[in-house]
Image (tube, grey):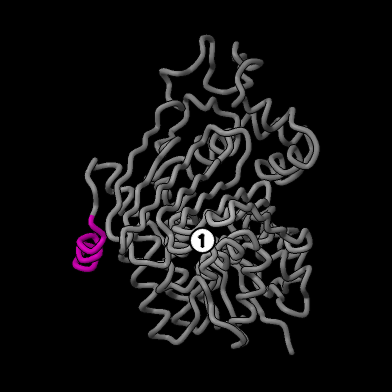
Amino acid sequence: MKPVTVAIMGAGQRGLDAYADYALRNPGEMKVVAVAEPIAQRREEAARLHDIDPSQVFTTWEDLLAKDQMADAAFVCTQDKEHFHPARIALEKGYHVLVEKPMSPDPLECLEMGRLSEKHGRILSVCHVLRYSPFFKNVKEIIDSGAIGDIACIQHIENVGYWHQAHSFVRGNWRNSDETSPMILAKSCHDMDIINWLAGKKCVSVSSFGSLSYFKPQNAPEGATKRCLDGCAAIGSCPYSAKKIYLDSKGSFGDMVRRIICGETGLDAAKKAVEEGPYGRCVFFCDNNVVDRQVVNLQFEEGLAASFTMCGFTGKGGRDINVMGTKGQILGNMEEQTIEIYDFLTDERTSVGLSKSTLDSGHFGSDDAMMSAFVRQLRGFEEGKTSAAVSVESHLIAMAAEKSRVSGKTVNLDEFRAEVGKA
C-alpha cells in the first residue's frame, strides 16, 4: 500500500517536529510532498528533510493552493486566524484536511468548516491530540467500563509552566488575542475537548473567571529594562529572564528553546535572537493581553459538573485529573503518567501502568497516535475521533467560557449556539 501524501502549510515547530516528522519515522505510511512556509530557514529545512521537489516548495499557502491538487491531504499549521481560508480552499480542491487547533477563533468559521467537509465529502480532522493520548484513552476506558459508577464531577487542571507561559503567551506568538486567540482557545481548547469527551453528555451552561494579573508594567521589578540584556538590574533574580530561559538553560530543554527562537541550538545565534527579537523582551513590558490564570465551571446534563483550572505559575507543565464517580474515583497526572483507581466498596487503590513504548512522541505519545489514526482514517480503516462536527462543540464551549469571563455572566449553551447560528 502506497504512503499517504501530504502538503503541509506552516512548517513551524508543530508542523515540522510533530506532524511532518511522523513521515520520516514511518515512510511506508506517509510522505510529505509539498510545503508552504514564509520563513526561509524552516521552508528549506522541510524541503531538505523530506526531499521535496523544488517545484513544490512555496513561500505562502496561497501559492501552494493556487496549484492543482498535489497530495492526498493538506495540513493547515498556520497561525490561529489563518486556518479557515486555507482549509476551505483545500477542501474545495479535494484534499482531506488536518487542521491545527483551534479551528478558528470565529465560531461561524468553525461551523462553516464542518459544513464544507460534509459538502465536499472530505475528512476534516482537528489536532485535538489528547483524545489519542495513551493517558486519556485509559481514563476514558475506565469511565466507560463502569468501574467508578456514574460520573458526578470532573476536576481538571492544566499546569502551563512558568517558562511556557512567559515564552508563548507573554513574549510569543499567542500573547495577544487580537492577533491570534484568547488563552482558552489557543492553549486550553484541548482541555475543553477532553472534559466534554470524558463527560459524554451535553454541556448546558458555562461560567468562567480569569485575568491577566501579573505580566503587566506595574509589576516590573525595580531597575527592570524593556529588554532583558539591556542592563536590567533584576536579570539575576527574575525567573522569567530571557537570559535564564534561553541562554543559561542546559541539556535538551536548552536545545529546544534555543531552536524555537533562532532555528538552531548554538548560543551565539540564541544571544542574537534575544538581543534583537521578541523573545528578549521583558515579560512586564510586552504587548500581551491573554490571561495568566483562568477557571471554568461547566454544567452538563443529568447534574454532572466539571471544573477546569489553567494557571501559568507552575514548575512543570502537564495535566492533573480527578474523576469522581458514584462507585469510585480516578486520580491521574499526565506529566507523571500515573493513573489510580479508588474503589469505594473495597477501599482498594489500583494503579494503571502505561507502556513506555507508547510515550515517545509529543504530548506523551499523543502526536504519533493521532497521526497514525489520521492515516488509517484516510485509508478507510477507522472513524476519526476529532472530526469537525465533534470539535466544533468543544470550541463553542471554550468560546462561551471566554464570553462568560469577559461579561461576568453565566452563559447558557443552547442560547449561545442559537446566537452563533444567527450571526
Q: Position of residue 248 (x, y in %)?
A: 74, 27
Find out whether residue 417 is within the magenta segment.
yes
Q: Quadrant of the N terminus?
A: bottom right
Q: How many marks?
A: 1
Question: Which residue occupies the foreground of this view, 159 or 39?
Answer: 159
Q: Position of residue 332 (x, y in %)?
A: 59, 50
The location of residue 153, given as percent across then percent down, is 41, 53
Identify the residue at horizontal 78%, vertical 42% (top origin). 252
Q: Give the magenta range.
A: 412-423
Relative horizontal placement of residue 90, taking residue 129 as reference (left or right):
left
Viewer-proximal residue among 254 and 70: 254
Say few, some or many: other residues with alpha carbon within 10 Å of mark 1 (under 14 / 14 to 19 / 20 or more): many
Q: Quadrant of residue 227?
A: top right
Mark 1 lies on residue = 148
Q: Is residue 97 above or below residue 222?
A: below
Relative placement, left or right, of 418 versus 388 is: left
Label 1's element? loop
